[in-house]
Image (cartoon, grey):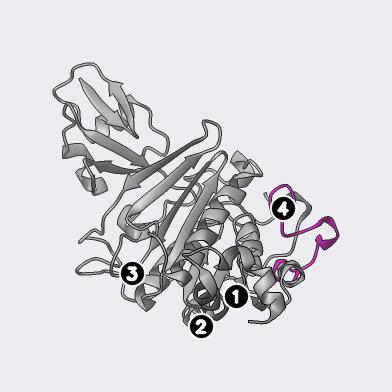
């Protein structure tokens, strides 16, 4: 199935049981435990990652912490 | 305006979006820059050059040799000097009319409310999550528009927040990451030109806000990757469940996020 991840079309193996949590693990996403996930325009609560299925056509954004600036 | 001012700002004045009226708005504008480092450097230089009348700059740090690769407002002879003093000298050298107010202190829950009260727009150019969350919360509670900016390695992100109208930093990141969870600039490094790109965008937002021109970077997180030379925009919206700007906020009083470490620590230890 194909989903869009940070603007890029990505083909993933078929997996009916895929959730946001398992997607983060499958893709080894940086900051996996802290990254904010936006699914189809809605920021998800972290608590919901395990119960939110990923389906074909989804638009997923991973939003990363960037803390630098001054020193 | 004096003859000299008309000449100095002539390239602004001929813009229909600025004109003499807009330039006067910049003269009357008051912008606070928190952090006189990588992001703060281009912000301070451009705002002073643009004729922003009152510019506050807050930072407790002194210039370090390892800052000079990117913090272009500080020069080699400034090493050891308070950053806010070094910054003030360059800003006033560019534009003697600029009123520069320096705050040689770190912002905290105790002082930030008083500091931001005197400004129309606030810019976050800090290097740590404790300050970033504090600035967001203070600006949301005070209804003060501000620009968020963050950088790491080759990546940067920026967002403008109009409290009560557009998504805030906590709408995206409800709470700071745990200490040590995210690599620091001193661990991960940062390409020297990166804060120049992001800081200049933040300064642009402040100028547009003062002018009332164009569209601000609200409800959109702009991300930039220098290696791939790509800008992206991620659409955002206010979250009803946001802990500070949502319908039933759990954060109603400023607090220091003690668990959020300084990510780009002072001496890069």
The CA distance from mark 2 to mark 4 is 29 Å
The extreme left residue here reads A16
Name the main secondary structure of what is drawn in magenta: loop
The CA distance from mark 2 to mark 1 is 9 Å
Name the residue tied to disc 2.
B118
Report the disc number at residue B56: 1
Residue located 42% across and 35% down the image:
A30
Dividing the image into 4 quarters, which one contains the N terminus of chain B? bottom right
**B84 within the magenta span:** yes
Name the residue tied to disc 4.
B67
Residue B257 in view in this figure? no
Q: Are marks 1 and 3 on the same chain?
A: yes
| Span highlighted in magenta in the image | B67-86
Q: Are marks 2 and 4 on the same chain?
A: yes
Tag 2 subunit: B
Q: Are marks 4 and 3 in contact (CB under 8 Å)?
A: no
Residue located 57% across and 46% down the image:
B184
Report the disc number at residue B163: 3
The CA distance from mark 4 to mark 3 is 33 Å
Task: State whether residue B64 is above or below residue B88.
Answer: above
The CA distance from mark 2 to mark 3 is 17 Å
Mark 2, secondary structure of its residue: loop
Report the disc number at residue B99: none
Q: Specify which label sits upstream in the sequence, 2 or 4.
A: 4
Q: How far across and down, in percent of the image, does residue B38 sit?
A: 63, 54
Left-right relation of B152 to B67: left
Tag 3 subunit: B
Q: Are marks 2 and 3 on the same chain?
A: yes
């Amino acid at each position: 199935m194909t989903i869009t991840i940070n603007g890029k079309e990505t083909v993933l193996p078929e997996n009916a049981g895929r959730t946001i949590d398992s997607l983060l693990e499958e893709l080894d996403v940086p900051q996996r435990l802290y990254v904010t996930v936006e699914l189809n325009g809605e920021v998800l609560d972290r608590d919901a990652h395990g119960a939110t299925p990923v389906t074909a056509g989804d638009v997923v954004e991973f939003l990363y912490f960037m803390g630098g600036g001054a020193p | 305006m004096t003859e000299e001012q008309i000449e100095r700002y002539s390239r602004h004045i001929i813009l229909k979006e600025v004109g003499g009226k807009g330039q006067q708005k910049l003269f009357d504008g008051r912008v606070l820059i928190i952090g006189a480092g990588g992001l703060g450097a281009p912000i301070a230089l451009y705002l002073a050059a643009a004729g922003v009348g009152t510019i506050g700059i807050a930072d407790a740090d002194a210039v370090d040799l390892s800052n000079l690769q990117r913090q272009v407002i500080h020069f080699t002879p400034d090493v050891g000097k308070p950053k806010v003093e070094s910054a003030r000298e360059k800003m006033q050298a560019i534009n003697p009319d600029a009123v520069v107010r320096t705050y040689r202190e770190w912002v905290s829950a105790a002082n930030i409310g008083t500091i931001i009260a005197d400004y129309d727009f606030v810019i976050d150019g800090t290097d740590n999550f404790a300050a970033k969350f504090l600035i967001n919360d203070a600006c949301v509670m005070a209804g003060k528009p501000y620009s968020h900016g963050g950088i790491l390695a080759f990546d940067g992100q920026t967002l403008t927040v109009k409290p009560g109208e557009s998504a805030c930093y906590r709408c995206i990141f409800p709470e700071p990451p745990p200490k040590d969870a995210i690599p620091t600039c001193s661990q991960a490094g940062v390409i020297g030109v990166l804060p120049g790109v992001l800081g200049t965008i933040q300064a642009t937002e402040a100028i547009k806000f003062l002018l009332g021109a164009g569209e601000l970077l609200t409800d959109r997180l702009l991300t930039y990757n220098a290696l791939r030379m790509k800008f992206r925009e991620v659409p955002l919206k206010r979250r009803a469940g946001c802990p500070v700007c949502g319908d039933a906020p759990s954060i109603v009083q400023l607090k220091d996020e003690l668990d959020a470490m300084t990510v780009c620590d002072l001496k890069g230890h």
